[in-house]
Image (cartoon, rainbow, N blue to C red):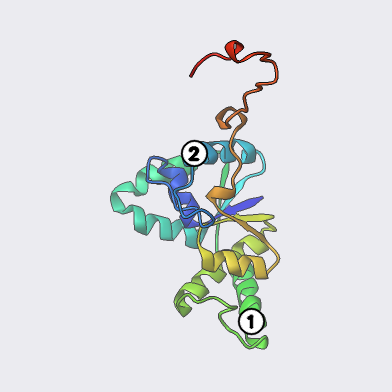
Amino acid sequence: MVLLDTSVLAYLLYPDAPAPIDPTTGHPVGACKERLQHFVKRHQKSKILIAAPTYAEFLVKAGPDKFREVDEIFKKSSAFKLAAFDEACALECALLEQEARREGDKKSGSTAAWQKVKFDRQILSVGLFHSVTTIYTDDESLRGLATRSGVEALGIADMPLPEASRQHKIDFSAATHVDDVAPL
C-alpha cells in the first residue's frame, strides 16, 4: 500500500493544473498527467491510502464548491482508501515526537514551522500504522520525516512514465548509407 500527500493528490484530481517543479532539474515535471494516470493503474489493486489530515487539507484548498465533486471521485474509485487519524495513529504520532525529542530535535531536522511538522507527523503516522511502503509527496518536510522513519518518499517526478509515453531511440545501425536515412 502507498500513501499520497496533498501535494500529489491535488495533481491527481486536477491533472490539468500546471505541473510541479522537479527539484532535481528546476523545471516542471514532464508528462505529469501521464505519470499520475499510470501510477493509479499500477496501484489499483494494492490501494492508494489517503490520510484524513491530507483529505482535509486538500478540501480546504479545493474550496467548498468542490467538496461534492471530490467526494464522488473517492466513492466511485476502488483505488483509494481514506484512512482516519484515530487512536492508534495518535499513539504512533506521539511515539514519533517522543523519539525526536529524545534525539534532541523535536522537529526531526525539518525547517518547516512547528505546526506544519506536527501536521506532517499526523500524515506519516497514518501511513506507518497502515504499513505503507512508500509515501508520494512533493513536500520536502514530509519527505524528510518519512525518510527518517524508514519509509521511502517519492515525488511526482519519481513516478515512472507508461511505456507508451517514453521516447524510443531510433536505430540508425540498419542504414548502410546516408541516402538510406530519410530527411527530418
Between 97 and 36, the residue placed more toward the observer is 36
Dot label at residue 182: none
- Give percent across and percent down for residue 69: 37, 42
N-terminal-most mark, 1 or 2: 2
- Give percent across and percent down for residue 104: 63, 88
Q: Against 90, is 55 above or below?
A: above
Circle 1 residues within 10 Å: few <14, some 14–19, many ≥20: some
Q: Residue shown at 45%/40% (left/top)?
A: 73
Q: Residue furthest top?
A: 180
Q: Against 52, is 177 above or below?
A: above
Q: Against 126, is 34 above or below?
A: above
Q: Residue shown at 41%/56% (left/top)?
A: 58
Q: Secondary structure at mark 1?
A: helix
Circle 2 residues within 10 Å: few <14, some 14–19, many ≥20: some
Q: Secondary structure at mark 2?
A: loop
Number of on-image labels: 2
Q: Quadrant of residue 162?
A: top right
Q: Amino acid at mark 2?
A: Ala
Q: Pointer 1: what residue?
A: 100
Q: Pointer 2: what residue?
A: 31
Q: Is residue 180 left or right of residue 33?
A: right
- Give percent across and percent down for residue 28: 44, 48
Q: Residue shown at 64%/74% (left/top)?
A: 91
Q: Is residue 28 left or right of residue 145?
A: left
Q: Residue shown at 56%/80% (left/top)?
A: 107
- Label 1 and label 2: CA atoms lie apart by 38 Å
Between 10 and 89, the residue placed more toward the observer is 10
- Give percent across and percent down for residue 44: 62, 38
